[in-house]
Image (cartoon, coloured by chain):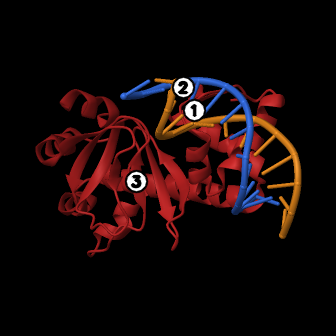
Chain colours: A red, B orange, C blue
Amino acid sequence: MEESLLQNYGYLFEDALMAEMQEVGVVKRFDQGTIIMDIGETISHMPLLLSGAIKILREDESGDELLLYFLERGDTCAMTFSCCVGTHKSEIRAIAESNTELVMIPVQNMETWMSKYGTWRQFILDSYHTRMTELLETVDTIAFLRMDERLLKHLQDKAMVNHDEYVQTTHQDIAYDLNTSRVVISRLLKKLEKEGKIEMHRNKIKVIDL
DNA sequence: ACATTAAGTGATT
DNA sequence: AATCACTTAATGT
């Protein structure tokens, strides 16, 4: 773990902080599809992504999911900040988009580090900001874009975080993420294929228009 | 060969 | 854009 922690965060933080991290941090691995954090769970640790990707979902009263954004290497979960001060529960669900490796830092540490290390404070502030920006972007997408544009954007995002132009998923899964029905996705996908933006295969979609 | 799961289609709201 | 009802295609046992 030391190597990949240094590789991903070493340039950001001073040596003393890196040393502390290695002391208190616990590396965890999650297989694709595993729920990392669910709605209602108390947040005790803060995750730092080493590799892989995580998708962040919101759930409505009837159990329907809606994808908010993806987290990638070097990112951290912004929900943690708002929740760890005091004992709040998670408002979101985090699922491993691909096989994921992350370091768990106890929330006590992140509080003391805030005042102790400037680089840490900067990191938290920056990631809060980028998270907020991404969230606004998805809000815009949902509010102003038609379903076909949302679909294409989602596929591009998915291809991006997995670093693969081939997106492994089913129509049903996409429908779930975008909170629509499978039939609609199937039809829109066919339209996108005709337009030459994607290529369909069973359980797999190639995104051409990246 | 059969059951299961994913995807395609037409009609209706 | 959603839902229903149904067909067709791919895959697992």
**Direction from residue A42 to residue A108 in the image, left or right:** left
Viewer-side residue, A84 vs A40:
A40
Residue, x 19% and y 31% (percent of image)? Answer: A2
According to the image, label 2 marks what residue? A164
What is the secondary structure assignment of the residue under circle 1?
helix
**Direction from residue A177 to residue A91 in the image, left or right:** left
Q: Is residue A74 visible?
A: yes
Residue, x 66% and y 56% (percent of image)? Answer: A180
On the image, which quarter does residue A93 sit in?
Answer: bottom left
User: Are labels 2 and 1 on one chain?
Assistant: yes
Looking at the picture, how far across and down is residue A208, in whole percent? 70, 25
According to the image, label 1 marks what residue? A159
User: Are labels 3 and 1 on one chain?
Assistant: yes
Q: Earlier in the sequence, mark 3 or mark 1?
A: 3
Q: CA distance from mark 2 to mark 1?
A: 5 Å
Q: Earlier in the sequence, mark 2 or mark 3?
A: 3
What amino acid is at disc 3? Ala
According to the image, label 3 marks what residue? A94
